[in-house]
Amino acid sequence: MSKLSRRNFLRTTLYSAAAAGAVSPMIVRAQDGVAANDKINCAVIGLNGRGQSHIGGFINNPNTVITYLVEVDEAIGKVRCDQVEKRQGSRPKLITDMRDAFADPELDVVGSATPNFWHGLSAIWAMQAGKDVYVEKPACQNVFEGRTMVAAAKKYGRVCQVGTQCRSNPALINAIQFIRDGGIGEVNFARGLCYKRRKSIGALGDYTDRIPGSVDFNMWTGPAIITDPKLTRPNFHYDWHWQRLYGNGDSGNQGPHQFDIARWGLGIMRHPNSVITYGGRLGYQAERNDPNYVDAGDTANTEVSIFSYGDKTLVFETRGLETPDLDGAKIGVIFYGTEGKLVQESYGHCVAYDKEGNVIKEFNGGSDQFHFDNFIEAVQKRDPSILNAPILDGHLSASLAHLGNASYYFGEKNKISVPELRKALEDVRGLDDDVATLDRTVEHLKANGVDLDVTPLSLGPTLHFNPEKEEFCDNSSYAAPLLNREWREGFVCPSAEEV
Ligand SMILES: NC(=O)c1ccc[n+]([C@@H]2O[C@H](COP(=O)([O-])OP(=O)(O)OC[C@H]3O[C@@H](n4cnc5c(N)ncnc54)[C@H](O)[C@@H]3O)[C@@H](O)[C@H]2O)c1
């Protein structure tokens, strides 16, 4: 019997048996899917950067085999195919349209390391085709598609893990448990940091002739509208992160890791009630020594968002210019408790301090592989409840970036002086000293040669959000279009109700 027939036989027989009450649904879930001697067939989509970690994650798991590589840049795809063949001993099929892999009933699992704007559709199409999905962070590029992804996982009974791998790292698991056990007292406030130097991606221009000939541009662009000119940044791959049509800036790139950890530590399983953001894309004129320089990116490289959950506050700071750390962290989270603080310094290291600043405990350990193994275990057991980063968590964490950016994008033209900004922040009344955070931000910008009289910060509106309905409240409803995107024909994301 072929693997497919064997699987179908197993599924049909067990489901009939379950329906007849012969076996418990739990047993069906445990046995449905992959028979003991079969390997789990995997496809990896998007192979330039992070896709290599997906390849490693699946190859290093003894229960999986990569049968498809999907890449719209043929040159990259061929190199990865050779590499996979060498490492696993069998050559995957290399294709450019992910739907061809999804149509194969022998395929079990999909890893999507595509650019952000493809996460939603790749995961939704895969789940509709009955595949389990490991999708990169940010889980979604907007709130609308995140909702659909959550609904699709539920409707199709799929396992959907998000690539916030810190969730599987002992350093974080133990540190969060320490917070939960009261190790630093009561904690109602966390500060996420993305202090990550990002140089200018080059001047805004027409670089259409730099689209690599090996790229299927239609499939790369997918749900995004095709612009004229087609390419306005010098580098085709990766730098899309800093153009909002495709990416989400660093608060939506590095940010989802730290948003996720902050939410986890604060014990928050919902969207916030409100957000206000100030920021800018600053410093590149000084970096290029040209006051008229216009960088090709249009996301903020300096961004402070203040989220309110009523009794809890989350502040997120993004800095793309040179900066020292804060309390030992550059890319991390600081939890402020009544008895001390806990600092996530890296993916595998956290430190807890008492009120006097003495180290009381350190937490170590982590590896990407743990997260892939956790996913595969959930696939084998047909049990999404054992996932460390299920799609709902990914959606909630990514949405923080989207809501923070929504306030920034609306306020973009509202250029404001530092004294006016300081005054406006006095009304925010969260748990942070918002003026002190602003003063640190201003000092940081000045240290990078930014003249805030010439290129001022901008302040967005306070956007009020209804966490249950996942929509802006009436007084903020003008921001509703930013919860969704304009979809290109043929690549339209269904709503949560339609999926
Ligand atoms: N979890 C992590 O720590 C981590 C680290 C790095 C990147 N990421 C995430 O991984 C994703 C990819 O990042 P990257 O740095 O590799 O970006 P990248 O632009 O370097 O690579 C993306 C690849 O996907 C390919 N691609 C685009 N559309 C495709 C499609 N429709 N079908 C198949 N292939 C397609 C591109 O040609 C490119 O090779 C991003 O969403 C990023 O946020 C996560």
Image (cartoon, rainbow, N blue to C red):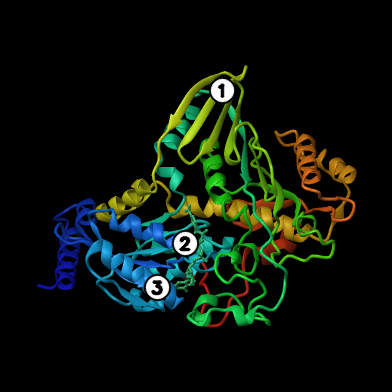
Measured in 3D between alpha carbons, the distance from the residue under mark 3 to the one under mark 1, in whole angstroms, is 47 Å
In this rendering, the answer to whether 180 lies above or below 15 is above
- Using a 10 Å C-alpha cutoff, classify the residue at mark 2 as few (fewer than 14 neighbours), some (14 to 19) or many (20 or more): few
Q: Secondary structure at mark 1?
A: strand
Measured in 3D between alpha carbons, the distance from the residue under mark 3 to the one under mark 2, in whole angstroms, is 12 Å
Q: Which residue is mark 2?
A: 49
Q: Which residue is mark 3?
A: 77
Q: Which residue is mark 1?
A: 353
- Using a 10 Å C-alpha cutoff, classify the residue at mark 1 as few (fewer than 14 neighbours), some (14 to 19) or many (20 or more): many
Ligand 1 within 8 Å of disc 2? The answer is: yes
Residue 129: tell me if it is visible: no
Find residue 409 and report its image quarter: bottom right
Q: Secondary structure at mark 2?
A: loop
Query: For the point 63% across and 81% down, which residue is it?
Result: 208
Find residue 460 and report its image quarter: bottom right
Marks 3/1 in contact by CB < 8 Å: the verdict is no
N-terminal of the pair, mark 3 or mark 2, is 2
Specify the quadrant that holds the N terminus. bottom left
